[in-house]
Every structure is written in structure tokens, then in C-alpha cells.
Amino acid sequence: MTPLLKTISFVFYPILHLLNIPTEASLGIVFAMIRKDGMLLFNQGSGQFLHQLSSFQLFTLVFLASTFSSCMVTITAIIRQMGCWKTALSIVVKQMITSILCICLFAVLICIGL
């Protein structure tokens, strides 16, 4: 499945590029969508990747990875509880949009110096 997940991770390249975050972080975001502890991929090589990030980049990356989507376990629980894919998908899409809007707001605030 790794080649498939790597392909999916390309979706995050434009966002990461806009935020000046290395695109190697995209796979960690995808794994965080499956399980929140997937963010541990950012810590590969004894944290070598994390050490090259500024505080803002690190905060933004962790925020994006943790809020972009619920983990698949949570989504599955929502589907089982509500019995409806449409409701679960609606919740996930709203969460994704909110996360992206928050990231854009962070970027604008940083650019204007607040």
C-alpha cells in the first residue's frame, strides 16, 4: 500500500509548498489520516527532519496533520453509529475545509506580521 499512499501524499505538496514546509512531510500527513500516531513519521532519523523546521513550520505541520481529518478508526465509528456514509463524509469534508482555512489564516497572520 505504500506506493498508493505516496501517490495520495502528492495532494499535500501545494499546501506544504505554500507554507514553506518540506514536501517530505506529506506522507506523515497521510499516515495521520489513517491513525493519529502516523505523525511519528515526522520523527524519523532521530528527529533530523523536525530539527530543520522553524517553530511556525512545526506548529503548522502538526496542526495540519492532527486536524485535517479524523483518523479512519473514528470515521468508521461514526459510520457504524450513524449508519450513514453521507453523514460521515459530510463531517470529514467540513473538518478538512476548516483545517485548511485555519492554516491559511495562520499563513496570512504570519505574512502581515501579527
Image (spheres, rainbow, N blue to C red):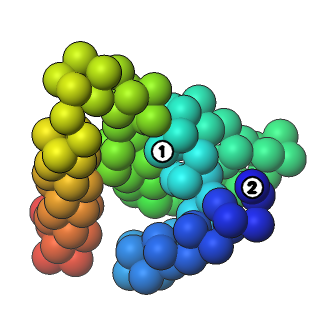
Residue 94: x %, y % from top left: 14, 51
Report the disc number at residue 72.
Answer: none
Of mark 2 and mark 1, the one earlier in the sequence is 2
Q: Nearer the viewer, residue 112 or 17?
A: 17
Left or right: residue 54 versus residue 56 is right
**Residue at the extreme front of the image, as rendered:** 83
Q: Give the Cα distance between marks 2 and 1.
A: 14 Å
Q: How many marks?
A: 2
Report the disc number at residue 33.
Answer: 1
Q: Is residue 14 above or below residue 109?
A: below
Q: Residue at x 28, y 29 (%)?
A: 79
Quarter that holds the C terminus:
bottom left
Residue 19: x %, y % from top left: 39, 73
Which mark's residue is nearer the viewer, 2 or 1? 2
**Taking the image as drawn, is residue 20 in sight?**
no
Residue 17: x %, y % from top left: 47, 81
Q: Quadrant of residue 91?
A: top left
Q: Mark 2 highlights which residue?
A: 1
Local secondary structure at mark 2: loop
**Taking the image as drawn, is residue 76 in sight?**
yes
Disc 1: CA contacts within 10 A as few (<14), some (14-19) or many (>=20): many
Q: Label 2 sits on what residue type? A: Met
Local secondary structure at mark 1: helix
